[in-house]
Image (cartoon, rainbow, N blue to C red):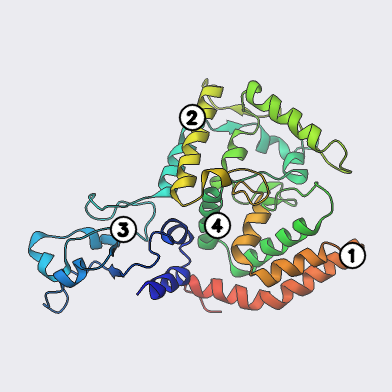
Amino acid sequence: DIEKFRQNIDNNESEIIKLKYSNYLKDKNVIIVGPSSYLNKIEYGDFINSFDVVVRVNTGHYIPSNMEKYIGNKIDVYYSSWPDTNQGNDSGTGKFFPFKKLKNIYKIIPETEGCIENISKEKGCGGLCCFVQSPQFLYIEFLYIWQFIKENWSGDEICDIIQKSMLNVIKGDTTKGCVFFNQETKKCKIHQVRGYSCRLYGITPEEEFKPRYERMKELYKNVPGAVVKEQCNLIKTIGKKQVTIFNTNRWWNELIQIEKKIGIKGEDISDKQGGSYRMPHDHILLFTMPENVLSALAGISLYDNAHDKIMAVSDLMGLIRNHFRGDYEQSKGTEN
C-alpha cells in the first residue's frame, strides 16, 4: 500500500524519488514490481495492471510479451537504483537519471588551472576564497555530492563534516568558509564532484559576475567581518575555449530544469530564505538532522560566548555521533 511504499522510500534514503513522486502517489493504490520474469508461474498480470500506479524497479520494466500474463504490462514509474547507467531496455516510462544529466552539464564546462596550483605556494592565495567564503549549490548538486560522500567517506568523516557544518551555522558573522575545504592540505575534499558555482569561479563572464559582485558588496557593506572578493585572477581555462554569458545562461537554465524534475518548485529555486540554492553546511544539516537538533542549534547560536557555542556543539554532536556513524557504516556494508 501507499504507506509501505513511502516507508520503503525513506528506508533506502531515495530523496529524489520522495521529492518527485510523493504528491503523485497520494491516495493511490501502488504496486512495486521487480525484475522477476515470472512469479511462481501464477498469472498476476491482470492483478498488477489493476493498480492505479505500477512502479517497475531496475530491469523490471523489460517485459517480454510472453510474460505479460505473469507480471502485467502497465508502467507508470520506472526507478533504477543505478542512477548512472541504462539498465535493460530503454522504453521505461517515467525514467529519469538526474545525476547523469548533471554530469553531462559539468563535462561541457571547460576545465581550469591556476588556482589549486597556487594555493599552497608561499606567496600564493592560500585558498582565501574557500576559507572565508562558501559556495552555494542547488539541491540536486548537493544530492550528487552527498552520494559521493556516502560512497567514499567513513562514518567518522561524515560525522566530522556534520560537526563542521554545525559550527558554521552558529557563527555570528559571514566569514564561514566552505566546509569541504581542508585547511591543512589546502585542498577541496570533493573537488571531482564540486558544484556549478565552484566550476565557474574565476572564469565567469565579467558582464555576469560584475552585477552579482556589486549586489553582494551592497548586501554585506555593514556586516562586521564580511569578505566579498572579486574573481580570482589566477584561474584560467585549459585550452582556447572561453566561457561566454550565452554559455552560462544555457548551463544554468539546464540545471534549473533538473532541479524542477526532482520536485523543486520554480519559485523555490533561489538563494532566499527556504530556497533550494544553499550553502553546503545548510544542505548537510537540513538533510541529515531531525527538527529537534536544528532547534537546539538555533538556541546555541544565541549564546554570547564563542567558546560556549563550540562546547555546546561538541556536546550535541557527541550525543548523535555513535548512532549516526553506525547507520552509515551499516549502509555501506561494514561492521560498526
Q: How crowded is mark 1: few (under 14 residues within 10 Å), some or many (20 or more)?
A: few
Q: Residue furthest right?
A: 305
Which x, y percent locates residue 109?
Answer: 51, 32
Q: Distance between the residues labelled 2 and 1?
A: 46 Å
Which x, y percent locates residue 260?
Answer: 47, 46
Q: Earlier in the sequence, mark 2 or mark 1?
A: 2
Instruction: Give the residue number, with chain letter if any, for mark 1.
Output: 307
Return the residue nearer the eye: 44 or 170: 44
Q: In the image, which is nearer the foreground, mark 4 or mark 3? A: 3
Placement of 268 over or under 336, stated as above or below = above
- Which amino acid type corresponds to the residue marked 1 in the rendered image? His
Q: How far apart are marks 4 and 3 (CA)?
A: 24 Å
Return the residue nearer the eye: 138 or 334: 138
Q: Who's the residue at 70% across and 66% down the image? A: 294
Instruction: Give the residue number, with chain letter if any, for mark 2.
Output: 250
Q: Who's the residue at 51% across and 50% down the image? A: 264
Disc 4 + disc 2, Cβ < 8 Å: no
Disc 2 + disc 3, Cβ < 8 Å: no
